[in-house]
């Protein structure tokens, strides 16, 4: 197996931080609690996935200082993204979550939390608190699922994402124990979406009039790799 892990983000030297994304203490703050904030962060060096694109990742995150109340209590969400590069990519503001838009991140997949309901086309959001899968940086989302967790309540949550070359499975919990049943299972050919198996993993986020500190607290990613004799592993502590 190959992979990497961040126990926290005290050291972000392996990452390219874009726009408003910063290190805040031991956290990776992808967007901030100011209006019209957006950011992204990707590994500076891409990873080489197996021929079927398979991988597993888990990260913990929190959304704090959300507001204002008239903007559904905060906006707009946080995505884990894999794309074909470069590491400086970023999408639009607001409901684009730093991923979608006319200049969105193409040749990509995004999985994460959407915390603001944009009900009109092209977004057509399920509600203001749901999990989401998107591809090619274009709306509407490919798959959505409502969950009971309030993403904006400031607590630490966990997300697991598994891809076996056919099905993308997304799990979410308020504890570090992975649920037995996925919240989303979506069939997709990610290698065709990327056009490669050499990809840049990372995160995107944005707000507009709504905002919040969207922090990634820890992150681990693993994949099978037959072309490299030793795992690619780095750990930030």
Image: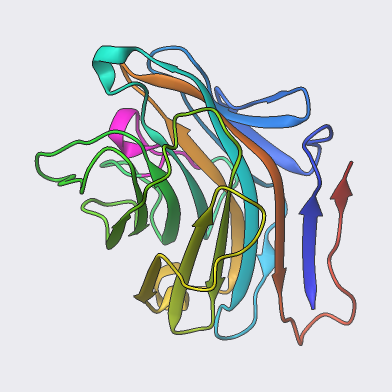
Along the line of sight, the residue nearer the viewer: 149 or 169: 149
Left-right relation of 210 to 171: left
Where residue 48 appears, as percent x and y from the top left, is 68, 71
Residue 3 located within the stretch drawn in magenta: no
Left-right relation of 117 to 66: left
Q: In this view, does 60 lie above or below 56?
A: above
Where residue 188 appears, as percent x and y from the top left, is 37, 77
Where residue 176 appears, as percent x and y from the top left, is 67, 54
Q: Is residue 28 above or below residue 164?
A: above
Along the line of sight, the residue nearer the viewer: 117 or 34: 117
Q: Which residue is drawn at 86% across and 55% down?
A: 234
Q: Which residue is drawn at 13% across and 39% down?
A: 119
Where residue 194 appears, as percent x and y from the top left, is 46, 68
Along the line of sight, the residue nearer the viewer: 233 or 68: 68
Quadrant in which the N terminus is drawn: bottom right
The magenta span reads: 89-99
Q: Which residue is drawn at 31% across and 58% down?
A: 145
Q: In this view, does 91 lie above or below 211?
A: below
Dominant secondary structure (helix, strand or loop) of the stretch shown in magenta: loop
Quadrant in which the C terminus is drawn: top right
């Amino acid at each position: 197996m190959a992979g990497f892990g961040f126990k926290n983000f005290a050291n972000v030297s392996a990452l390219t931080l874009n726009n408003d994304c910063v290190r805040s203490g031991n956290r990776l703050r992808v967007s901030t609690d100011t209006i019209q904030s957006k950011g992204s962060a990707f590994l500076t060096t891409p990873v080489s996935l197996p021929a079927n694109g398979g991988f597993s990742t888990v990260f913990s995150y929190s959304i704090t200082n959300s507001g204002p109340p008239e903007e559904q209590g905060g906006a707009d969400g946080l995505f884990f993204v894999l794309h074909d590069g470069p590491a400086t990519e970023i999408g639009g503001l607001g409901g684009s979550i730093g991923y979608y838009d006319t200049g969105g991140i193409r040749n990509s997949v995004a999985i994460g939390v959407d915390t603001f309901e944009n009900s009109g086309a092209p977004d057509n959001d399920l509600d203001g608190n749901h999990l989401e899968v998107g591809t090619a940086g274009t709306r509407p989302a490919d798959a959505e699922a409502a969950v009971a967790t309030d993403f904006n309540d400031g607590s630490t949550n966990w997300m697991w994402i598994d891809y076996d070359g056919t099905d993308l499975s997304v799990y979410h919990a308020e504890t570090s124990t992975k649920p037995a049943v996925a919240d989303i299972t979506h069939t997709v050919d990610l290698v065709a979406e990327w056009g490669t198996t050499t990809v840049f993993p990372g995160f995107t986020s944005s707000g507009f009039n709504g905002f919040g500190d969207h922090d990634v607290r820890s992150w681990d990613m693993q994949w099978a790799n037959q072309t490299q004799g030793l795992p690619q592993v780095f750990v930030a502590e």
